Amino acid sequence: MPKIRLPFADKANNRSYLNTADYLLLNAYIEHNSKGADIIKRPGFKSKLATSSIVTDGRGFTYSNKHSLYYALIGDALFSIDSSLATVTEIARKTPTAASWGAGVATYTFAAAHGFIAGQSVNVSGISPAGYSGVLTILAVTTVTVPDDSFTVTMATLGAATLTNARVSPILTTTGKAYFEQTKSSTTINTMLLIPKTSTTASQLFMIAASGVVTRVTDADLPVDLIGAPVSIDGYLFVLSAAESEIYNMDLEAPTSINSLGFVAADTYADTAVTLAKHHNQLVCKKEYSTEFFYNANIAAPYSPFAKIPQQTLTLGCASAASVVQTGQSIIWMSRNQNGGLAVHMMTGGQAQKVSTVSIDRILASMESFVFSDKVESCYLSVDGHDFYVLSVDGVVSGTGAVVDYAVVDVAVVDTAGALNSFKRTMVYDITQNEWCEWSSLDETTSTQSSFFATYSVSGPHVTNAQDFSNTLVMEKTTGNIYEMSPAPLGVAYLPTYKDGSRTITVECVFNPVDGGTRNRKRCNSLEILGDTASSSVSVSYSDNDYATWSTARTISLVDRARIPNLGMFRRRAFKLTHAADTPLRLAGIELDVERMES
């Protein structure tokens, strides 16, 4: 019988949400050409700045063109980072000019307005003796005239003390994604930081000025149940209140003040609000099962200037605020319909189009019960002419006998103790090619394939280092460390890496089964890999029992003709190729020399 060619770039139609059977493309993307399609190994992420020695848990990351600074929320601390990624400064803090103690309280006096409020918890450090450091509660705030603005806090101990480099920092909530937004004030552009409410903490809104001064918005009319991302349009900063799905606007070019009447309700349907977004010049409110649109109707203050566009309302919602990504003229997000089904949709020109496949929907359906904002991350990456929407889910499943750790390739770990376990999966949509794949990284602790690190991304400027530049920077969620997407080669100094930090990227392609159109026995005389030559190798194994077990892998060099002879007899066979090296890879498919037998 004639030789059989199997393409690497195939369509997934997996039987379940697991990736242990049927087609899989891991850590490579598909690129169509005039002769068909190739798979290309994704670039890695170079380590740019280690912040884990400061504090861990990356929660948000952005770049302010106006300030020429990056801002990062890591754990419960807010940092500014200069554009060369060299200097990291903690900015969510204030240094008092004087302090006095007595009657079990301390009074701090500041040279400038500090933004603290009564009842707020703060972290006091740098006081001698150590008993005066720690988490304290503000009793009262006395605003006289700067520089005599002061507040008092309860003290851990009594006694005399001297002021030694005191720092007072707000206690920021410690879990969940935080959102940054650039907004205009009457004199400049400021960066706003919104930390949404959780089940145990109220929301917090801060303004970061160009000078690095962080001011908490303390207007009494500001709701304490803000959720999702803030949006800035036409000089207004909009925030979303969860209670009644009300969209509040801060005053015009005054992002720290608000009027209790300055809101418009997203109440066409009675479902729960999720987040705000913007589409062209329209304000978009994404709810659990619907989406509503608003435009600037120039309604006079104190009311909201925006009004609803009823005819544009969609019966298509959003499963997670953290899944929403704005990509130039489009919005892409994990959607939810009124029947509860999860998918991925993209909105362009006011039209919502489903871009997820049946296989992706099947994976999403398996995680329906734990899609929460702190379990989902998404980002937008652009490399080599491809635009990627990266959707990472890190949830938990529980119960004795639950199958867990689905991202461990070819391994389904069974929980016999009933403990909570991770569901880690990263699905990647190539907007340019309209194709899906999966990404992962090697877990250095367990040396197994785990979920690709969930990231918060930012399109930064060229950093000022003479031998480096940045296309896209990302923050790793677990550590807060910052990585640079490996750039395309522009010379030896800029050759890309195919590692995530020090973690090896492993490409894996599992083919759909082949039987040559007959159940007769066949002899595979040889397998040849079609693609570019490279200074690395691939390993080839196969399964003749529907992915239940695999043959011992055979390794073949890609330097010369990549051919393996004598692969035995089969009726129906699936092949698997893996590649683990810090080298590029582009492959088109495999060619099988198969001889049909009589039975």
Image (cartoon, helix red, strand yellow):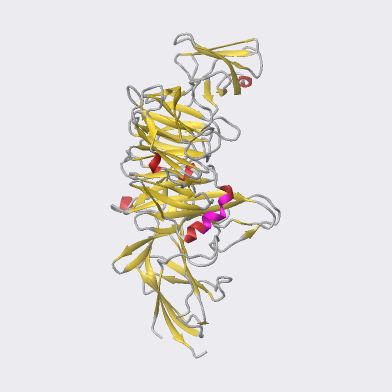
Q: Quadrant of residue 18?
A: bottom right
Magenta stretch contains residue 456: no
Q: Residue furthest front?
A: 311
Q: Is residue 499 above or below residue 455?
A: below
Q: Quadrant of residue 39?
A: bottom left
Q: Is residue 478 above or below residue 250?
A: below
Q: Quadrant of the N terminus?
A: bottom left
Q: Is residue 145 above or below residue 392?
A: above
The residue at the point 33 percent across, 37 percent down is 281
The residue at the point 55 percent across, 47 percent down is 371
Q: As rendered, which of 84 and 378 lies closer to the eye?
A: 378
First to last magenta residue range: 362-368
Query: Residue 72 location in percent, x, y?
Result: 45, 35
Query: Residue 251 location in percent, x, y?
Result: 39, 23
Query: Residue 323 location in percent, x, y?
Result: 47, 45
Asked if residue 500 shows in the view, the reply is: no
